[in-house]
Image (cartoon, rainbow, N blue to C red):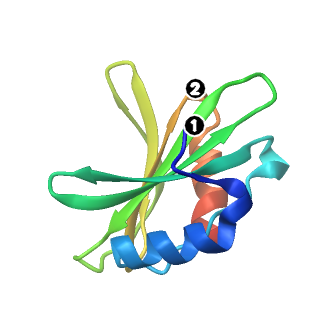
Amino acid sequence: MVEVPASEQAHIESWLSKEIGVDFKVPNLSDAGWTVQGARLLVVAGKPVAQLMYTNAEGAVIALCGLQNTSGSTVEPALRAFGDVHMATWKNTTGSFAIVGDAPDALEALAKTAAALI
């Protein structure tokens, strides 16, 4: 599921921060029932994208993805849908983020929690 396990959180944070060019922290979503499993690095449209994987007690999976925001603009967390794919997206001054996965009803709340912790 991941390249680097959650037990290496300090490594994940320094590695992904360096690779995507954004000061990146692994949000603790355990109060909402989600446990971080670890991370991987993806490439989308030629840009590095951080991906954190989380699971809940029922085995559902969500991914939190982040990449550099070069515009510097900010956007509050909001739910978006593309057909059957639901995600919550937001931007801070340095990063663009999305949470997508098996919890469409919880994604916006999870995004608000994660946005405050990243």
Farthest residue toward the left? 46
User: Residue 81 location, x and y as percent?
Assistant: 37, 31
User: As rendered, which of 106 and 34 lies closer to the eye?
Assistant: 34
Q: Is residue 8 above or below residue 19?
A: above
**Which of the two labelled residues, at mark 2 and mark 1, occupies the earlier sequence position?**
1
Total labels drawn = 2
Dot 1 amino acid type: Ile
User: As rendered, which of 64 and 7 lies closer to the eye?
Assistant: 7
Q: Is residue 27 above or below residue 17?
A: above
| Residue bearing the label numbered 2 | 102
Q: Is residue 84 above or below residue 22?
A: above
Which quadrant holds residue 20?
A: bottom left
Task: Tell me the residue at 67%/58% (across/down).
Answer: 113
Q: Quadrant of the N terminus?
A: top right
Task: Tell me the residue at 57%/72% (across/down).
Answer: 13
10 Å neighbourhood of mark 2: few (<14), some, or many (≥20)? some
Q: Secondary structure at mark 2?
A: loop
| Residue bearing the label numbered 1 | 62
Farthest residue toward the top? 84
71 relative to 56 in the view: left or right: left
Distance, label 2 to label 1, CA atoms, is: 6 Å
3 relative to 36 in the view: left or right: left
User: Residue 118 location, x and y as percent?
Assistant: 58, 70
| Contact? badges 2 and 1 (CB < 8 Å) | yes
User: As rendered, which of 22 and 31 lies closer to the eye?
Assistant: 22
30 relative to 10 in the view: left or right: right
Task: Tell me the residue at 36%/72% (across/down).
Answer: 19
